[in-house]
Amino acid sequence: MRTPWHLWVVGGVSLLWNAGGAYDYLMTQLNNEAYLSMLTEPQRALMDSRPVWFDAAWAIGVWGSILGSLLLLLRSRFAVQAFLASFLGLIVSAIWSFGIAEPSSFEVMGSFAAIFSLAIAVVIVLLYLYARAMAARGVLR
């Protein structure tokens, strides 16, 4: 089957979008002082209190999305599973950020944190649905 033009657009734009999350993840994990200097003291304390399982879920969320975008561009049906894993990673990390962390991300960063997390979740779900539709149409092998 011929690759529809929109697959290249969705794959390319999603890779750029997800690269932002990967950059944030890497700068935080590498404890890059120049990058982290933009955080307030309470935000920095929240980041420093992350449990290991949060970091694992965050990694699955970030790298699952990057992998999903790359697999979409490679026309691989495994893009569906990668986006699903990314969504599950986001859900698990959000449970800590908004439900377990004291203070929560909402308390430390305000409504922006919740709105941005919701936007990320919507994008991942849309990418998952798109990949699933492309797999069902036989575009992804």
Image (cartoon, helix red, strand yellow):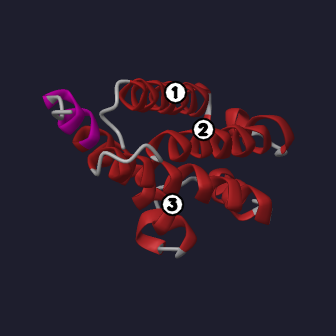
Is there CB contact under 8 Å for labels 3 and 2? Answer: no
Q: Nearer the viewer, residue 29 or 107?
A: 29
Is there CB contact under 8 Å for labels 1 and 2? Answer: yes
Crowding at dot 2, Cα within 10 Å, few <14 / some 14-19 / many 20+, comes out as many
- In the rendered image, residue 9 lying in the magenta stretch gets the answer yes
**In which quarter of the view is residue 91 placed?**
top right
Q: Nearer the viewer, mark 3 or mark 2?
A: 2
Pick whichever of labels 1 and 3 is earlier in the sequence. 3
Pick whichever of labels 3 and 2 is earlier in the sequence. 3
Examine the residues drawn in magenta and state their main secondary structure: helix
Q: Position of residue 21 (x, y in %)?
A: 44, 51
The region drawn magenta spans 5-11
Q: How many numbered discs sit on the rendered protein?
A: 3
Q: Which mark is residue 125?
A: 1
Q: Which residue is mark 2?
A: 87
Helix, strand or loop under label 2: helix
Pick whichever of labels 1 and 2 is earlier in the sequence. 2
Q: Is residue 131 above or below residue 33?
A: above
Q: Amino acid at mark 2?
A: Phe
Q: Which mark is residue 25?
A: 3
Q: Position of residue 114 (x, y in %)?
A: 61, 28
Q: Amino acid at mark 3?
A: Tyr
Helix, strand or loop under label 1: helix
Residue shown at 68%/52% (left/top)? 42
Question: In the rendered image, which quarter contains the N terminus?
Answer: top left
- In the rendered image, residue 99 lying in the magenta stretch gets the answer no
Q: Position of residue 69 (x, y in %)?
A: 36, 47
Q: Amino acid at mark 1?
A: Val
Residue shown at 48%/73% (left/top)? 33
Alpha-carbon distance for marks 3 and 2?
16 Å
